[in-house]
Image: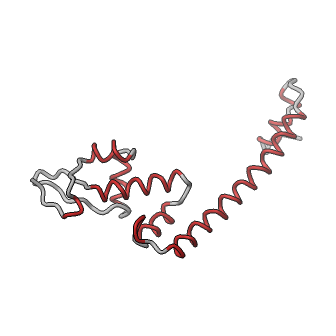
Amino acid sequence: MPTITSSRAEILSIGELSKRSGVKIETIRYYERVKMLPAPPRTTSGRRVYGIIDLRILAFIRRSRELGFSLEDIRALLLLGGPAKASCGEVREIATHHLEDIRAKLDDLTKLERLLAKTVARCSGKTAPDCPVLDILDIRRPR
């Protein structure tokens, strides 16, 4: 039987943690290596054992990634105390920066959409030498 702390009262194998969190086993190991997830205790045979807090941290990381937060931002949020203890002001600062990044990407995508729509509209569907879509994609192609 592994030695566990009270925060690891429910013992989960890495496979069960993966299944319940929706995070692949290799990704769990990666998060351990980069210190986003605490190194788990091990059984006498060397198997990792996890608890509910680890599951909550992984779910937090996964959801943050789904929302486009960088690992650096997620690490900062976890260092603030994680999903239960972080100061709203500090979290707001990180989230505001992320929101600005999203808005910049949306602006870039809107510009890209306009350019591509205009280019596709100019495309006659004839032979490749007269294709405006290929012209904007191939920098060496004569225009």
Coloring scheme used: secondary structure
Residue at 64% in and 62% down: 99
Q: Is residue 138 left or right of residue 127?
A: left
Residue 48 location in percent, x, y? 21, 53
Please tell me in which quadrant of the rendered image residue 69 appears: bottom right
In terms of depth relative to the viewer, which is nearer, 28 or 99? 99
**Where does the image place residue 1, in percent across and percent down from the top left?**
9, 53
Q: Quadrant of the C terminus?
A: top right
In this rendered view, identify the residue nearer to me: 26 or 91: 91
Picture residue at 20% right of the left edge, 59% below the top = 41
Residue 113, quarter of the rendered image: top right
Which residue is painted at 19% across and 63% down in the image?
Answer: 6
Please tell me whether residue 92 is drawn above or below residue 60 in the rendered image: below
| Tag count | 0
Q: Residue at x 87, y 40 (%)?
A: 118
23 or 35: nearer the eye?
Answer: 23
Q: Position of residue 135 (x, y in %)?
A: 83, 39
Asked if residue 90 lies left or right of residue 141, the reply is left
Up-down: is 62 above or below 37?
Answer: above
The x, y position of residue 52, in whole percent, is 29, 55
Of residues 136 and 20, the one drawn nearer to the viewer in this rendering: 20
